[in-house]
Image (cartoon, rainbow, N blue to C red):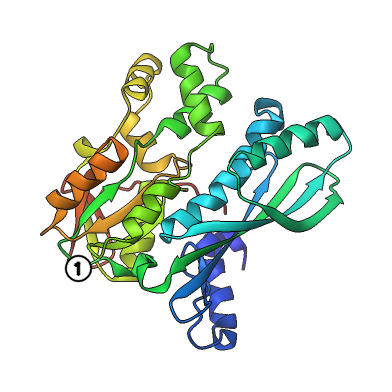
Amino acid sequence: MKIEEIGEFGLIGRIAAAFRPLVPAGWEGIGDDCAVIPWDDSRSLVVTTDLLVEDVHFLRDRISAYDLGYKALAVNLSDVAAMGATPTATFLSLGLPTDGVGVEWCDRFFEGYRSFGVPLLGGDTTAAPQGIVINITVLGMAESDRIKRRSGAEAGDLIVVTGPLGDSAAGLQALLADLPTTPEIAALIEAHHRPRPHLAEGEWLGRESDVHALMDVSDGVASDLRHILRASGVGAEIDTASLPISDRLQRVATEQGWNAIELALTGGEDYVLLGTVAPARFEELQARFTERFGRPLATIGRCVAGPAEIRYDGKPLDFSGFKHF
C-alpha cells in the first residue's frame, strides 16, 4: 500500500494507534496541536515539533534567510498558541547543503529565529545532500485547566477565527506567478513569509471557559476545521460571506482573477487561530476581545449536531486544504 492511498492523516492514525499503549496515564500524545505532559499540581508542559523541507514548504530563492528563520519558528509557536500556552524554549535541528549556504546565511537565519525572544536550548546540525531541512521542537507551559483542545466543540457553538484568511496563500501565488511587486503584492508576500503566531490571543482565549475548542490554521480552514469536528463529534455550517478576507486580497484577487473565498478556505499558512465559542456569552467575550486586540473575533459559522462534515452556505461543497501525500 502506498502512503498516498491513506494520506497524511491516515499515516498519523496508524502511528498513533501503534504507540497509544505506551503513553503514560495522564499524558496526551498524538492528536492535538501539542502533546501535553503533566508538570506539577496545576501546570502542564506542552510540546510540539514541525518539519520544513526546501521545495516543499519554502523556495530558497524566494525567501530571505531572515524570513526563513522567522517563519520556521513562527509555525511552531502557533501550535503552542493553539493550546492556550506560553512558549518557554526551543530546540532546532538543521540540515544544510554546501551550495549557496554560508556562514552569513546562517547568521541571518538565526537573526530571524531570535526575533520572538524564545530561547534556543540545543539541537543538531548536519550536512544535507539536496536542500535545507529544518526541524524545530517548542516547549510551552500552561495552567492545566486552561489548555484548549480540538475535542471540546459542542453543537451550537459559534466558529471563530482570530484574523484574516487567505493572505498567505495569495502571497505564495504571487511568488509563483512572478507578479510585479506592488505595495499590495508585497504585503501579501510578507504575510506568507512572516506569519504572526497569535500567541497573545491564544493565551487570552485559553483563560476563557466559553472557548471550547481551539487550533491553528496551517493547512486551511476547510482542512483544519475537520480535525475539530472529528475530535468533537459534531458537524459545521460555514457562511462564506462571513470569512474575514482583507481588502488587499479582495483587490488583488479581482485583478488576477483569483477566487478569494477558495484561497481563504484552502490556502493555509495563515496561522491565525480557529476556535469554537459558546453562543450564550459570545457578545460579552467579543467586546472584551475587541478591547484587548483592537479587532473582533470573526464569526464564520456554527457547529451543528450530526456527522463531522462541513456545509458551505447550506451546501456540501468539496473544499479541501493542503495535502502532503
Direction left: furthest residue: 280
Mark 1 Cα within 10 Å, few/some/many (few <14, many 20+)? few
Rendered-image quadrant of the N terminus: bottom right
- In this orientation, which residue lies closer to the viewer: 243 or 256? 243
Is 321 located above or below residue 48 in the figure?
above
Asked whether residue 143 is in view, the answer is: yes
Q: Is residue 25 left or right of residue 298?
A: right
Can the viewer see residue 58? no
Residue 28: x and y in percent read 49, 77
In the picture of the structure, the residue carrying the numbered disc 1 is: 306
Residue beneath the point at 65% across and 48% down = 52
Q: Nearer the viewer, residue 188 or 229?
A: 188
- Measuring from the top left, give residue 315's x and y in whole percent: 19, 48
Please report the residue visible at 63 percent of the width from the left and 58 percent of the height from the top.
Answer: 89
Q: Residue at x 33, y 44 (%)?
A: 162
Three-letter amino acid code of the residue under disc 1? Gly
Quarter in which the C terminus is drawn: bottom right
Residue 12 versus residue 277 in the image, above or below: below
Which quadrant of the structure image shows residue 297?
top left
Q: Assign a secondary structure to mark 1.
A: loop
User: In the figure, is residue 1 to the left or right of 120?
Assistant: left
**The one of 187 and 287 positioned closer to us in this rendering:** 287
Task: Residue 230: give x, y in percent of width and height.
Answer: 34, 67
Marker count (numbered):
1
| Residue at the image position 72 percent from the left and 57 percent from the top | 121
Q: Is residue 171 above or below residue 163?
A: above
Q: Position of residue 12 (x, y in %)?
A: 55, 68
